[in-house]
Amino acid sequence: MKKTLVLSAVLALATTSAHAEDLSQYSNESRAVAMPFLKQLGAANQKAVSEGGPESAIGVCRDIAPKMAGDISRQTGWKLTRVSLKVRNPLLGTADAWEQKQLQSFAARAAQGEKPETLEAAEIVQEPAGKSFRFMKAIALQPGCVSCHGSTEIPENVKAKLAAEYPHDQATGYSAGQIRGAVSIKRPL
Ligand code: HEC
């Protein structure tokens, strides 16, 4: 009886550490996909703003970002999206329950002094549709983003275009350094 107990304790321990190893390995792999995605988007945004002004950069967030996310999803078999608690495009950007919980926890952690660009969440979840690894990395607002996600910084022509294309826009009022949302990865296991 005692032996069985010890054995199951050892087994439980082994499972826990294997689980922890998986988590850190999956997190590293997800980070390796999320970081270049964010970097390329930031660069594309900067390029568009400097070449054609904020109005021409709308396409980066509206067309290039979802296309890149779609390409990555096809290539990896993981679902990669950008989500937020205050979305511009509810169809693509609305966070599900797990993502909302993490975004709320990111906000609380940032309020405690953690830097937005360091905030991450990782968990293996079991849902009716199956088991998956979920990963989120916060997106901090950069100075170049306020021309479309700030308040008074948004030029009139951009404001008009946003109002016409996104009548349900909630993604304004941010200042640089705040959490705009997160990259979210869901990987079936
Ligand atoms: C020129 C305007 C413009 C600039 C500059 C801009 N965005 Fe956006 N952003 C948009 C538009 C338009 C959408 C809606 C995209 C869509 O239709 O899916 C959006 C959506 C997003 C979303 C997806 C969630 C949502 O609200 O729908 C995130 C995250 C985001 N932007 C982050 C950023 C960050 C970070 C920067 C700076 C690096 C930035 N944006 C700069 C126009 C802009």
Image (tube, rainbow, N blue to C red):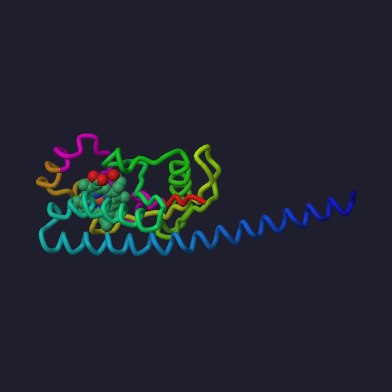
Q: Residue 166 lies in magenta, yes or no?
A: yes
Instruction: Indicate whether 97 appears above or below 138.
Output: above
Q: Where does the image place residue 178, in percent across and percent down from the top left?
A: 35, 52
Q: Residue 16 lies in magenta, yes or no?
A: no
Would residue 22 appear left or right of 136 to someone viewing this image? right
Task: In the displayed orientation, state which residue is furthest to the right.
Answer: 1
Instruction: Indicate whether 23 appears above or below 125.
Output: below
Instruction: Indicate whether 125 appears above or below 20.
Output: above
Q: Quadrant of residue 22?
A: bottom right
**Which residue lies at the image location 22% right of the left edge and 62% below the top edge?**
44
**What number of labels is visible?**
0
Q: Is residue 39 visible?
A: yes
Q: Where does the image place residue 183, in percent across and percent down from the top left?
A: 38, 53
In this orientation, which residue lies closer to the viewer: 147 or 169?
Answer: 169
Task: In the displayed orientation, state which residue is furthest to the top.
Answer: 168
Q: Is residue 150 visible?
A: no
Q: Which residues are magenta?
A: 162-184
Q: Where does the image place residue 180, in percent across and percent down from the top left?
A: 33, 50
Q: Where does the image place residue 160, in percent across and percent down from the top left?
A: 12, 41
**Which residue lies at the image location 37% right of the left edge and 63% below the top edge?**
35
In this orientation, which residue lies closer to the viewer: 105 or 177?
Answer: 105
Instruction: Indicate whether 189 appears above or below 21.
Output: above
In this orientation, which residue lies closer to the viewer: 84 or 65?
Answer: 65
